[in-house]
Protein backbone atom coordinates (compact mmCIF):
# COMPACT_ATOMS: atom_id res chain seq x y z
CA UNK A 1 0.00 0.00 0.00
CA UNK A 2 1.44 3.43 -0.90
CA UNK A 3 2.68 5.44 2.05
CA UNK A 4 1.38 8.90 2.77
CA UNK A 5 3.22 11.72 1.07
CA UNK A 6 5.90 13.83 2.69
CA UNK A 7 6.72 17.40 1.68
CA UNK A 8 9.77 16.03 -0.15
CA UNK A 9 7.83 13.39 -2.07
CA UNK A 10 5.09 15.94 -2.84
CA UNK A 11 7.76 18.27 -4.27
CA UNK A 12 9.12 15.44 -6.39
CA UNK A 13 5.62 14.69 -7.70
CA UNK A 14 4.98 18.41 -8.32
CA UNK A 15 8.24 18.84 -10.22
CA UNK A 16 7.36 15.77 -12.32
CA UNK A 17 3.94 17.25 -13.16
CA UNK A 18 2.08 14.48 -11.30
CA UNK A 19 0.42 16.66 -8.62
CA UNK A 20 -0.68 20.27 -9.08
CA UNK A 21 -3.47 20.63 -6.47
CA UNK A 22 -3.62 20.08 -2.69
CA UNK A 23 -6.95 19.94 -0.86
CA UNK A 24 -6.42 21.56 2.55
CA UNK A 25 -9.39 20.43 4.63
CA UNK A 26 -10.84 19.75 8.07
CA UNK A 27 -13.94 17.88 9.31
CA UNK A 28 -16.87 20.08 10.29
CA UNK A 29 -19.57 19.32 12.89
CA UNK A 30 -21.36 17.01 10.47
CA UNK A 31 -18.15 15.18 9.51
CA UNK A 32 -17.92 16.80 6.07
CA UNK A 33 -14.59 18.01 4.70
CA UNK A 34 -14.33 21.79 4.42
CA UNK A 35 -11.40 23.81 3.13
CA UNK A 36 -9.57 25.07 0.06
CA UNK A 37 -7.84 23.86 -3.08
CA UNK A 38 -4.23 25.08 -3.06
CA UNK A 39 -1.91 25.14 -6.01
CA UNK A 40 0.75 22.61 -5.05
CA UNK A 41 3.51 25.17 -5.65
CA UNK A 42 2.00 27.58 -3.12
CA UNK A 43 1.44 24.75 -0.63
CA UNK A 44 5.12 23.76 -0.89
CA UNK A 45 6.31 27.38 -0.64
CA UNK A 46 4.69 27.87 2.76
CA UNK A 47 0.99 27.09 2.53
CA UNK A 48 1.71 23.86 4.39
CA UNK A 49 2.26 25.84 7.59
CA UNK A 50 -1.22 27.30 7.95
CA UNK A 51 -4.16 28.93 6.25
CA UNK A 52 -7.39 30.55 7.46
CA UNK A 53 -11.14 30.05 7.24
CA UNK A 54 -14.27 31.69 8.61
CA UNK A 55 -15.24 30.42 12.05
CA UNK A 56 -18.85 29.87 10.96
CA UNK A 57 -17.68 26.53 9.54
CA UNK A 58 -18.12 25.05 13.02
CA UNK A 59 -21.51 26.70 13.53
CA UNK A 60 -23.48 25.70 10.43
CA UNK A 61 -26.29 23.24 9.79
CA UNK A 62 -26.52 20.66 7.01
CA UNK A 63 -27.73 23.31 4.53
CA UNK A 64 -24.76 25.58 5.41
CA UNK A 65 -27.04 28.09 7.14
CA UNK A 66 -25.43 30.37 9.73
CA UNK A 67 -27.24 29.14 12.83
CA UNK A 68 -27.85 31.71 15.60
CA UNK A 69 -27.19 30.97 19.24
CA UNK A 70 -23.67 29.52 19.26
CA UNK A 71 -21.21 31.04 21.71
CA UNK A 72 -18.20 30.15 19.55
CA UNK A 73 -19.26 32.07 16.43
CA UNK A 74 -22.02 34.45 15.41
CA UNK A 75 -22.96 37.83 14.01
CA UNK A 76 -22.38 39.35 17.46
CA UNK A 77 -18.71 38.32 17.32
CA UNK A 78 -18.40 39.29 13.66
CA UNK A 79 -17.68 35.79 12.32
CA UNK A 80 -13.91 35.99 12.51
CA UNK A 81 -11.27 33.51 11.41
CA UNK A 82 -9.96 30.15 12.49
CA UNK A 83 -6.47 28.94 11.65
CA UNK A 84 -6.20 25.68 9.72
CA UNK A 85 -2.92 23.93 10.54
CA UNK A 86 -2.14 20.96 8.25
CA UNK A 87 -1.31 17.68 9.98
CA UNK A 88 1.37 16.60 7.52
CA UNK A 89 1.09 12.97 8.63
CA UNK A 90 -2.25 12.91 6.77
CA UNK A 91 -0.84 14.22 3.46
CA UNK A 92 -1.73 11.75 0.68
CA UNK A 93 -2.58 11.37 -2.99
CA UNK A 94 -6.21 11.14 -4.05
CA UNK A 95 -6.02 8.83 -7.09
CA UNK A 96 -9.65 9.42 -8.10
CA UNK A 97 -9.01 13.16 -8.58
CA UNK A 98 -6.32 13.75 -11.24
CA UNK A 99 -3.21 15.55 -10.04
CA UNK A 100 -4.58 15.96 -6.52
CA UNK A 101 -3.35 15.42 -2.96
CA UNK A 102 -5.11 16.07 0.36
CA UNK A 103 -4.08 17.04 3.87
CA UNK A 104 -6.30 17.18 6.98
CA UNK A 105 -5.94 20.16 9.29
CA UNK A 106 -6.41 20.88 12.95
CA UNK A 107 -8.48 23.99 13.66
CA UNK A 108 -6.92 26.63 15.91
CA UNK A 109 -8.14 29.82 17.57
CA UNK A 110 -6.99 32.79 15.49
CA UNK A 111 -5.62 34.63 18.55
CA UNK A 112 -4.30 31.95 20.91
CA UNK A 113 -3.37 29.31 18.31
CA UNK A 114 -4.84 26.70 20.65
CA UNK A 115 -7.07 23.99 19.17
CA UNK A 116 -10.72 25.03 19.02
CA UNK A 117 -12.53 23.09 21.74
CA UNK A 118 -15.64 22.32 19.66
CA UNK A 119 -13.68 21.04 16.65
CA UNK A 120 -14.49 17.33 16.19
CA UNK A 121 -10.85 16.37 15.62
CA UNK A 122 -9.78 18.23 18.78
CA UNK A 123 -12.51 16.53 20.82
CA UNK A 124 -11.22 13.10 19.79
CA UNK A 125 -7.56 14.07 20.28
CA UNK A 126 -8.25 15.08 23.88
CA UNK A 127 -9.76 11.67 24.67
CA UNK A 128 -6.82 9.93 22.98
CA UNK A 129 -4.45 11.97 25.16
CA UNK A 130 -6.49 11.03 28.22
CA UNK A 131 -6.17 7.35 27.33
CA UNK A 132 -2.40 7.72 26.87
CA UNK A 133 -2.10 9.35 30.29
CA UNK A 134 -3.72 6.18 31.64
CA UNK A 135 -1.21 4.01 29.75
CA UNK A 136 -3.45 3.00 26.84
CA UNK A 137 -3.50 3.41 23.08
CA UNK A 138 -7.06 3.49 21.74
CA UNK A 139 -7.49 1.27 18.67
CA UNK A 140 -10.67 1.43 16.60
CA UNK A 141 -12.24 0.48 13.29
CA UNK A 142 -15.56 1.37 11.70
CA UNK A 143 -17.75 -0.62 9.33
CA UNK A 144 -19.37 1.90 7.01
CA UNK A 145 -22.66 1.11 5.24
CA UNK A 146 -24.38 3.07 2.47
CA UNK A 147 -26.77 2.75 -0.48
CA UNK A 148 -25.68 3.07 -4.12
CA UNK A 149 -28.23 4.34 -6.66
CA UNK A 150 -28.28 4.33 -10.46
CA UNK A 151 -29.49 7.94 -10.41
CA UNK A 152 -27.02 10.80 -10.66
CA UNK A 153 -27.08 13.46 -7.95
CA UNK A 154 -27.99 16.04 -10.61
CA UNK A 155 -31.05 14.06 -11.73
CA UNK A 156 -32.34 13.95 -8.14
CA UNK A 157 -32.34 17.68 -7.52
CA UNK A 158 -35.87 18.01 -8.88
CA UNK A 159 -37.18 15.24 -6.58
CA UNK A 160 -36.30 11.77 -5.38
CA UNK A 161 -39.43 9.83 -6.34
CA UNK A 162 -37.50 7.83 -8.96
CA UNK A 163 -34.66 6.77 -6.66
CA UNK A 164 -33.37 3.43 -8.03
CA UNK A 165 -31.01 1.17 -6.01
CA UNK A 166 -28.17 -0.33 -8.04
CA UNK A 167 -29.50 -3.87 -7.52
CA UNK A 168 -32.98 -5.33 -7.54
CA UNK A 169 -33.06 -7.30 -4.32
CA UNK A 170 -31.30 -8.02 -1.01
CA UNK A 171 -27.62 -8.43 -1.82
CA UNK A 172 -26.19 -9.43 1.57
CA UNK A 173 -22.95 -11.33 0.72
CA UNK A 174 -24.46 -11.93 -2.75
CA UNK A 175 -21.65 -12.09 -5.33
CA UNK A 176 -23.82 -11.95 -8.46
CA UNK A 177 -25.70 -8.89 -7.22
CA UNK A 178 -22.51 -7.11 -6.15
CA UNK A 179 -21.01 -7.76 -9.60
CA UNK A 180 -23.57 -5.24 -10.88
CA UNK A 181 -21.98 -2.46 -8.82
CA UNK A 182 -18.34 -3.26 -9.60
CA UNK A 183 -18.12 -0.33 -12.01
CA UNK A 184 -18.13 1.84 -8.87
CA UNK A 185 -16.90 -0.44 -6.10
CA UNK A 186 -13.77 -1.75 -7.82
CA UNK A 187 -12.73 1.87 -8.31
CA UNK A 188 -13.58 2.61 -4.66
CA UNK A 189 -11.37 -0.21 -3.37
CA UNK A 190 -8.43 0.56 -5.62
CA UNK A 191 -8.53 4.35 -5.34
CA UNK A 192 -8.88 4.33 -1.54
CA UNK A 193 -6.03 1.82 -1.30
CA UNK A 194 -3.99 4.13 -3.49
CA UNK A 195 -4.77 6.97 -1.06
CA UNK A 196 -3.05 5.03 1.72
CA UNK A 197 -6.20 3.64 3.32
CA UNK A 198 -5.87 -0.09 4.14
CA UNK A 199 -9.06 -1.29 2.46
CA UNK A 200 -9.90 -4.92 3.23
CA UNK A 201 -13.15 -5.61 1.41
CA UNK A 202 -16.54 -4.46 0.21
CA UNK A 203 -19.69 -6.57 0.39
CA UNK A 204 -23.39 -6.45 -0.23
CA UNK A 205 -25.41 -5.56 2.85
CA UNK A 206 -28.93 -6.33 4.04
CA UNK A 207 -31.03 -4.70 1.30
CA UNK A 208 -31.12 -3.86 -2.40
CA UNK A 209 -28.28 -1.52 -3.27
CA UNK A 210 -26.80 -1.50 0.23
CA UNK A 211 -23.03 -1.89 0.54
CA UNK A 212 -20.51 -2.12 3.36
CA UNK A 213 -16.86 -1.12 3.16
CA UNK A 214 -14.28 -2.48 5.61
CA UNK A 215 -10.76 -1.27 6.29
CA UNK A 216 -8.06 -2.28 8.76
CA UNK A 217 -8.24 -1.12 12.37
CA UNK A 218 -5.83 1.59 13.47
CA UNK A 219 -5.36 4.15 16.21
CA UNK A 220 -8.52 6.12 16.90
CA UNK A 221 -7.49 9.35 15.14
CA UNK A 222 -6.28 7.57 12.00
CA UNK A 223 -9.52 5.57 11.94
CA UNK A 224 -11.66 8.72 12.09
CA UNK A 225 -9.54 10.40 9.41
CA UNK A 226 -9.81 7.31 7.16
CA UNK A 227 -13.56 7.03 7.73
CA UNK A 228 -14.04 10.66 6.65
CA UNK A 229 -11.88 10.28 3.54
CA UNK A 230 -13.70 7.04 2.62
CA UNK A 231 -17.08 8.80 2.69
CA UNK A 232 -15.74 11.67 0.61
CA UNK A 233 -14.08 9.29 -1.84
CA UNK A 234 -17.15 7.09 -2.29
CA UNK A 235 -19.36 10.10 -3.03
CA UNK A 236 -16.90 11.54 -5.53
CA UNK A 237 -16.21 8.23 -7.28
CA UNK A 238 -19.93 7.44 -7.56
CA UNK A 239 -20.66 10.97 -8.85
CA UNK A 240 -17.92 10.67 -11.47
CA UNK A 241 -19.68 7.58 -12.85
CA UNK A 242 -23.14 9.12 -12.96
CA UNK A 243 -24.29 7.37 -9.76
CA UNK A 244 -25.21 8.60 -6.29
CA UNK A 245 -24.91 7.27 -2.76
CA UNK A 246 -26.47 8.08 0.58
CA UNK A 247 -25.10 7.68 4.07
CA UNK A 248 -28.45 8.55 5.63
CA UNK A 249 -29.21 6.33 8.61
CA UNK A 250 -32.63 5.50 7.14
CA UNK A 251 -33.50 6.52 3.59
CA UNK A 252 -36.67 4.40 3.25
CA UNK A 253 -39.14 3.30 5.93
CA UNK A 254 -39.30 -0.26 4.63
CA UNK A 255 -35.58 -0.76 4.10
CA UNK A 256 -32.70 -1.57 6.42
CA UNK A 257 -30.87 1.41 7.86
CA UNK A 258 -27.18 2.10 7.31
CA UNK A 259 -24.82 1.79 10.27
CA UNK A 260 -21.25 2.70 11.16
CA UNK A 261 -20.44 0.02 13.74
CA UNK A 262 -17.40 0.98 15.82
CA UNK A 263 -14.96 -1.76 16.92
CA UNK A 264 -12.82 -0.80 19.91
CA UNK A 265 -9.92 -2.10 21.95
CA UNK A 266 -7.13 -0.71 24.11
CA UNK A 267 -3.47 -1.60 23.94
CA UNK A 268 -0.89 -1.13 26.69
CA UNK A 269 2.85 -1.50 26.06
CA UNK A 270 2.00 -2.86 22.64
CA UNK A 271 -0.15 -5.66 24.03
CA UNK A 272 -3.97 -6.03 23.92
CA UNK A 273 -5.25 -4.70 27.24
CA UNK A 274 -8.68 -6.28 26.74
CA UNK A 275 -7.47 -9.91 26.76
CA UNK A 276 -7.30 -12.23 29.76
CA UNK A 277 -6.85 -15.91 28.80
CA UNK A 278 -8.04 -16.96 32.24
CA UNK A 279 -11.46 -15.36 31.86
CA UNK A 280 -14.39 -17.34 30.49
CA UNK A 281 -14.91 -14.85 27.66
CA UNK A 282 -11.25 -13.88 27.45
CA UNK A 283 -12.15 -10.42 28.78
CA UNK A 284 -9.74 -8.61 31.09
CA UNK A 285 -10.87 -6.53 34.06
CA UNK A 286 -9.90 -3.44 32.04
CA UNK A 287 -12.21 -4.48 29.22
CA UNK A 288 -15.08 -5.15 31.60
CA UNK A 289 -14.72 -1.75 33.27
CA UNK A 290 -14.48 -0.09 29.84
CA UNK A 291 -17.62 -1.83 28.58
CA UNK A 292 -19.47 -1.07 31.83
CA UNK A 293 -18.64 2.61 31.35
CA UNK A 294 -20.03 2.59 27.83
CA UNK A 295 -23.23 0.91 28.93
CA UNK A 296 -23.64 3.47 31.72
CA UNK A 297 -23.08 6.39 29.34
CA UNK A 298 -24.77 5.10 26.18
CA UNK A 299 -28.02 7.03 26.55
CA UNK A 300 -26.07 10.27 27.18
CA UNK A 301 -23.83 9.91 24.09
CA UNK A 302 -26.62 9.40 21.56
CA UNK A 303 -26.38 12.88 20.00
CA UNK A 304 -22.83 11.94 18.96
CA UNK A 305 -23.88 8.54 17.58
CA UNK A 306 -27.20 9.57 15.99
CA UNK A 307 -27.15 13.32 15.28
CA UNK A 308 -30.32 13.86 13.20
CA UNK A 309 -34.04 13.33 13.61
CA UNK A 310 -33.81 10.78 10.79
CA UNK A 311 -31.12 8.84 12.68
CA UNK A 312 -33.65 7.47 15.17
CA UNK A 313 -35.86 5.95 12.48
CA UNK A 314 -33.16 3.29 12.06
CA UNK A 315 -33.74 1.79 15.51
CA UNK A 316 -36.47 -0.71 14.76
CA UNK A 317 -37.00 -4.40 15.49
CA UNK A 318 -35.70 -7.02 13.11
CA UNK A 319 -33.50 -4.94 10.79
CA UNK A 320 -30.19 -5.41 12.66
CA UNK A 321 -30.15 -1.99 14.34
CA UNK A 322 -30.10 -2.33 18.14
CA UNK A 323 -32.97 -1.19 20.32
CA UNK A 324 -31.50 -2.18 23.72
CA UNK A 325 -28.47 -0.90 25.62
CA UNK A 326 -26.97 -4.21 26.68
CA UNK A 327 -23.99 -6.42 25.90
CA UNK A 328 -23.80 -9.91 24.49
CA UNK A 329 -21.17 -12.13 22.88
CA UNK A 330 -21.39 -12.47 19.09
CA UNK A 331 -25.01 -11.31 19.10
CA UNK A 332 -26.14 -8.81 16.48
CA UNK A 333 -29.29 -7.86 18.40
CA UNK A 334 -27.20 -6.20 21.15
CA UNK A 335 -26.19 -2.56 21.27
CA UNK A 336 -22.73 -3.69 22.38
CA UNK A 337 -21.45 -6.92 20.87
CA UNK A 338 -18.32 -8.65 22.15
CA UNK A 339 -16.38 -10.02 19.17
CA UNK A 340 -13.31 -12.28 19.04
CA UNK A 341 -14.42 -13.91 22.27
CA UNK A 342 -11.63 -15.83 24.04
CA UNK A 343 -8.82 -14.60 21.75
CA UNK A 344 -6.27 -11.80 21.76
CA UNK A 345 -8.53 -10.09 19.22
CA UNK A 346 -11.38 -9.76 21.73
CA UNK A 347 -13.00 -6.35 21.28
CA UNK A 348 -16.20 -4.34 21.67
CA UNK A 349 -18.40 -3.55 18.70
CA UNK A 350 -20.84 -0.72 19.34
CA UNK A 351 -23.69 -1.26 16.88
CA UNK A 352 -25.58 1.94 17.72
CA UNK A 353 -23.96 4.58 15.45
CA UNK A 354 -25.51 5.23 12.05
CA UNK A 355 -23.59 5.94 8.85
CA UNK A 356 -24.60 9.60 9.30
CA UNK A 357 -22.53 9.96 12.49
CA UNK A 358 -19.42 12.13 12.59
CA UNK A 359 -16.70 9.51 13.28
CA UNK A 360 -14.57 11.86 15.39
CA UNK A 361 -17.48 12.58 17.73
CA UNK A 362 -18.69 8.96 17.84
CA UNK A 363 -15.22 7.60 18.63
CA UNK A 364 -14.58 10.34 21.20
CA UNK A 365 -17.91 9.76 22.95
CA UNK A 366 -17.36 6.00 23.16
CA UNK A 367 -13.79 6.41 24.36
CA UNK A 368 -14.75 8.96 27.01
CA UNK A 369 -17.40 6.70 28.51
CA UNK A 370 -15.11 3.66 28.44
CA UNK A 371 -12.25 5.49 30.15
CA UNK A 372 -14.69 6.74 32.80
CA UNK A 373 -15.61 3.11 33.43
CA UNK A 374 -11.94 2.21 33.95
CA UNK A 375 -11.31 5.20 36.22
CA UNK A 376 -14.34 4.39 38.37
CA UNK A 377 -13.82 0.61 38.11
CA UNK A 378 -17.45 0.12 37.14
CA UNK A 379 -18.70 -3.45 37.41
CA UNK A 380 -20.00 -5.07 34.25
CA UNK A 381 -23.47 -6.56 34.54
CA UNK A 382 -24.34 -10.01 33.21
CA UNK A 383 -24.38 -10.88 29.54
CA UNK A 384 -27.86 -10.84 28.01
CA UNK A 385 -28.33 -13.68 25.55
CA UNK A 386 -30.89 -14.51 22.90
CA UNK A 387 -33.12 -12.11 21.00
CA UNK A 388 -32.62 -8.77 22.68
CA UNK A 389 -35.38 -7.22 20.60
CA UNK A 390 -37.80 -9.26 22.74
CA UNK A 391 -35.92 -8.89 26.04
CA UNK A 392 -37.76 -7.14 28.86
CA UNK A 393 -36.50 -4.78 31.56
CA UNK A 394 -33.51 -3.54 29.58
CA UNK A 395 -32.55 0.07 28.97
CA UNK A 396 -33.86 1.20 25.60
CA UNK A 397 -31.90 3.14 23.01
CA UNK A 398 -33.42 6.66 23.03
CA UNK A 399 -35.98 6.78 20.22
CA UNK A 400 -35.90 10.49 19.35
CA UNK A 401 -33.29 13.20 18.99
CA UNK A 402 -35.35 15.31 21.39
CA UNK A 403 -34.90 12.68 24.10
CA UNK A 404 -31.20 12.26 23.29
CA UNK A 405 -30.57 16.01 23.36
CA UNK A 406 -32.08 16.30 26.81
CA UNK A 407 -29.89 13.49 28.10
CA UNK A 408 -26.74 15.09 26.69
CA UNK A 409 -27.60 18.47 28.21
CA UNK A 410 -27.97 16.87 31.64
CA UNK A 411 -24.91 14.63 31.29
CA UNK A 412 -22.34 15.08 34.04
CA UNK A 413 -20.19 12.44 32.32
CA UNK A 414 -19.76 14.45 29.12
CA UNK A 415 -19.50 17.77 30.89
CA UNK A 416 -16.54 16.29 32.77
CA UNK A 417 -15.01 14.62 29.72
CA UNK A 418 -15.67 17.19 26.98
CA UNK A 419 -16.35 20.39 28.92
CA UNK A 420 -19.44 22.59 29.13
CA UNK A 421 -18.63 24.48 25.92
CA UNK A 422 -18.57 21.30 23.83
CA UNK A 423 -21.72 19.83 25.38
CA UNK A 424 -23.64 23.09 25.00
CA UNK A 425 -22.42 23.51 21.40
CA UNK A 426 -23.60 20.09 20.24
CA UNK A 427 -26.77 20.26 22.30
CA UNK A 428 -27.56 23.50 20.46
CA UNK A 429 -26.89 21.76 17.13
CA UNK A 430 -29.36 19.03 18.08
CA UNK A 431 -31.98 21.57 19.17
CA UNK A 432 -31.62 23.39 15.83
CA UNK A 433 -32.01 20.11 13.93
CA UNK A 434 -35.19 19.37 15.88
CA UNK A 435 -36.60 22.87 15.33
CA UNK A 436 -35.92 22.74 11.58
CA UNK A 437 -37.55 19.32 11.25
CA UNK A 438 -40.56 20.47 13.26
CA UNK A 439 -40.87 23.59 11.05
CA UNK A 440 -40.70 22.05 7.57
CA UNK A 441 -43.75 20.58 5.81
CA UNK A 442 -42.83 17.13 4.45
CA UNK A 443 -44.09 14.87 1.67
CA UNK A 444 -45.38 12.61 4.44
CA UNK A 445 -47.55 15.45 5.76
CA UNK A 446 -48.99 16.03 2.31
CA UNK A 447 -49.71 12.35 1.61
CA UNK A 448 -51.51 11.89 4.93
CA UNK A 449 -53.36 15.17 5.27
CA UNK A 450 -53.92 16.88 1.93
CA UNK A 451 -57.24 15.12 1.26
CA UNK A 452 -58.08 13.60 4.64
CA UNK A 453 -57.63 16.54 7.01
Image (cartoon, rainbow, N blue to C red):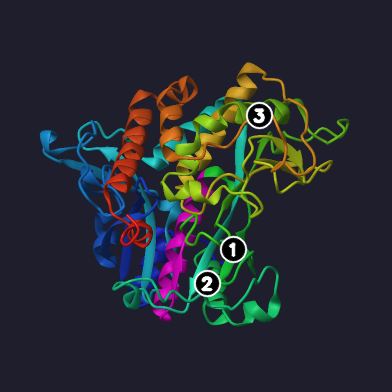
Pointers 1 and 2 in contact (C-beta within 8 Å): yes
Mark 1 lies on residue:
213
Q: Is residue 126 above or below residue 181?
A: above
Image spot of residue 219 (x, y percent): 58, 45
Pointers 3 and 2 in contact (C-beta within 8 Å): no
Determine the residue positioned at 78% across, 35% down: 275
Per the picture, the main secondary structure of the magenta-coloured stretch is helix
Name the side, left or right, on which 119 lies relative to 388: left
Q: CA distance from mark 3 to mark 2?
A: 35 Å
Graded by Cα atoms within 10 Å as few (under 14), some (14 to 19) or many (20 or more), the crowding at tag 1 reads many
Q: Is residue 93 visible?
A: no
Q: Secondary structure at mark 2?
A: helix
Q: Which mark is residue 290?
A: 3
Q: Nearer the viewer, residue 367 or 425?
A: 425
Q: Which mark is residue 188?
A: 2
Q: Quadrant of residue 352?
A: top right
Q: Is residue 188 above or below residue 292?
A: below
Which numbered disc, 1 or 2, marks the residue that appears first in the sequence? 2
Q: Is residue 7 above or below residue 53?
A: below
Q: Secondary structure at mark 1?
A: strand
Amino acid sequence: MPANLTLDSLKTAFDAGEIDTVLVVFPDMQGRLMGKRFHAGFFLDGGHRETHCCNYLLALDMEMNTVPGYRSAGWEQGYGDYVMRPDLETLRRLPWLPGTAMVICDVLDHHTHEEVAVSPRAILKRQIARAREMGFEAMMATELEFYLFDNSYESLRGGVSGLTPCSGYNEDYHIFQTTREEGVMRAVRNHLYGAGIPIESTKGEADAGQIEVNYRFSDALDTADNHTIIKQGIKEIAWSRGKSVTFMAKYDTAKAGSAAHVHQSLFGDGQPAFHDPGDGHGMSATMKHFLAGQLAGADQMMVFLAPYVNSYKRFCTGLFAPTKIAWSCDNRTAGFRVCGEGTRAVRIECRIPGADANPYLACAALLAAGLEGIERKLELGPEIRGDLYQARDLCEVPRTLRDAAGRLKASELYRRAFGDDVVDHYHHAAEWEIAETDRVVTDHDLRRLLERA
